[in-house]
Amino acid sequence: MPRDRLSSSAAGALLGCALGDAIGELAFSHAAEEELANAISAQPKLIYTDDTAMTIALAESLIEEGGIDQQRLGQRLADHFAEEPWRGYGPGPPKIFRKARNSNLTFTQVARDLYNGEGSLGNGAAMRVGPVGVAYRDRPELWDAAHASAEVTHAHPIGRDGAAVQALAVGVATAHALHGRRLDPLVTAESLASAAETNLIREKMEAVARLLAEGAPPPKVADTVGRSIAVHESMPFAIYAFLKTPQSFQESLHCAILNGGDVDTLGAMTGAISGAYLGIDALPIGCRIKVENGAYLETLGKRLAEAFPA
C-alpha cells in the first residue's frame, strides 16, 4: 500500500478508531496502565465493537456514493448490524433499523421520533464520523456532511453538533498531516469551540481550551467536561486527550481510556483523530497487527483517500 500522506491519514484514522475501540473495551475491566498492557499482550486478537463496525459502514457508504446518501447509509448501517448484532450496539440504532425495515418511514424520520421526538444526543454518531472528517478535511461541505451522517441515527441538535465537531477535529488533523503542518493544541481547541452550533457543545469545548491552557490534569478535565455516553460528555474529553499529547498515539489513547467513563467510545474518537494526524505508521505495531480485520481497514483507508483525493 502506498504510504502517501492522505492514504496514511485515512488508514490511520480507521485503524486508530479500531485500536482505540478495542483497547478501550479492554479498559473497562483493566483500568490501570500496566494491567491493560498485560491484557493486550494476552489477547491473540483485538476485537472492536459497534463503534468501529459503524465507522466501516460509513466509510464504505462514502466511497460508494461519493458523499452522504442518508437512506443508503442507513441501510448499510442496518446491514452491518444484521450481520453482527453482537458488537455491543446501544438501544437506539437497532430500534431505528427495525422500524425503518417494517414501515414506509426513512431512517432519518425514525431517528427523529426517538426519545419523545427529540432524537438521540448520544455519542454514536460522533464515534463513527471519522471517515467524514478525512473525506471533507479542507472542504466547506464537512459540516453539512457530518450532520447528514449523524441524522440517520442521532437527530437531536446536540447529537448532530457533537458529530460535526468530532468530524472537524479529524478533518483538521488530516489537513495538517497532508500539508506537513504542526498542529497547535490550544488554537485547535479554540477553533473547534467557535465552530460548535449548540451552546452546550461550545461551552464544553471552551472548557477544554481553558483547561489545556492551565495544564490541568486529565482527571480534572474528565470531571469537568464529562465522560458518559452523551456526546457533550464524551466527545470533548476525547478531543482533549488527543490535544494534550498530539505527537503520541499511545499517550493520547491512554489519557482517553484510563480515566473512566465510556472508554471504548472515548478511545475510538481519540484514536481516529490521532491516527489521522500521525498516520498509520505511528500506530504501535504490536497492537496494530492484532486488530481484527486490520488489513481490510487499511485497504478501506486507501480507498477512501482515492475517492476523496487531495
Image (cartoon, rainbow, N blue to C red):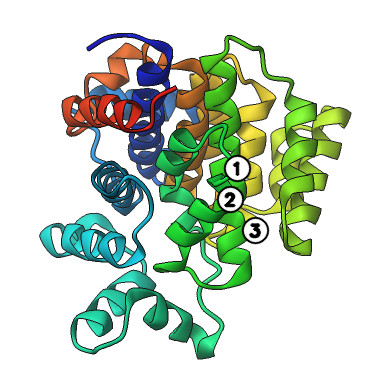
Q: On the image, numbered disc 2 is attached to which residue?
A: 143
- Residue 71: percent from left, percent from top: 30, 68
Q: Quadrant of residue 103?
A: bottom left
The C terminus lies in quadrant: top left
The Cα atoms of the two marked residues, 2 and 1, are separated by 7 Å
The Cα atoms of the two marked residues, 1 and 3, are separated by 23 Å
Q: On the image, numbered disc 3 is attached to which residue?
A: 232
Q: In the shown orientation, is residue 219 left or right of residue 252?
A: right
Q: Residue at x 14, y 65 (%)?
A: 82
Query: Do tag 2 and tag 1 residues touch (Cβ < 8 Å)?
Result: yes
- Residue 192: percent from left, percent from top: 72, 42
The Cα atoms of the two marked residues, 3 and 2, are separated by 17 Å
Q: Amino acid at mark 1?
A: Pro
Q: Quadrant of residue 101?
A: bottom left
Secondary structure type for disc 3: helix
Q: Residue furthest left?
A: 83
- Residue 296: percent from left, percent from top: 17, 30
Secondary structure type for disc 2: helix
Q: Is residue 7 above or below residue 300?
A: above
Which of these two is toward me, 23 or 289?
289
Q: Residue at x 55, y 21 (%)?
A: 251
Q: Which mark is residue 140?
A: 1
Q: Earlier in the sequence, mark 1 or mark 3?
A: 1
Q: Earlier in the sequence, mark 3 or mark 2?
A: 2
Q: Amino acid at mark 2?
A: Trp
Q: Residue at x 28, y 49 (%)?
A: 65
Which of these two is toward me, 228 or 209?
209
- Mark 3 residue crowding within 10 angstroms, few (<14) / some (14–19) / many (20+): many
Q: Amino acid at mark 3?
A: His
Secondary structure type for disc 1: loop
Q: Is residue 170 above or below residue 50?
A: above
Q: Which mark is residue 11?
A: none
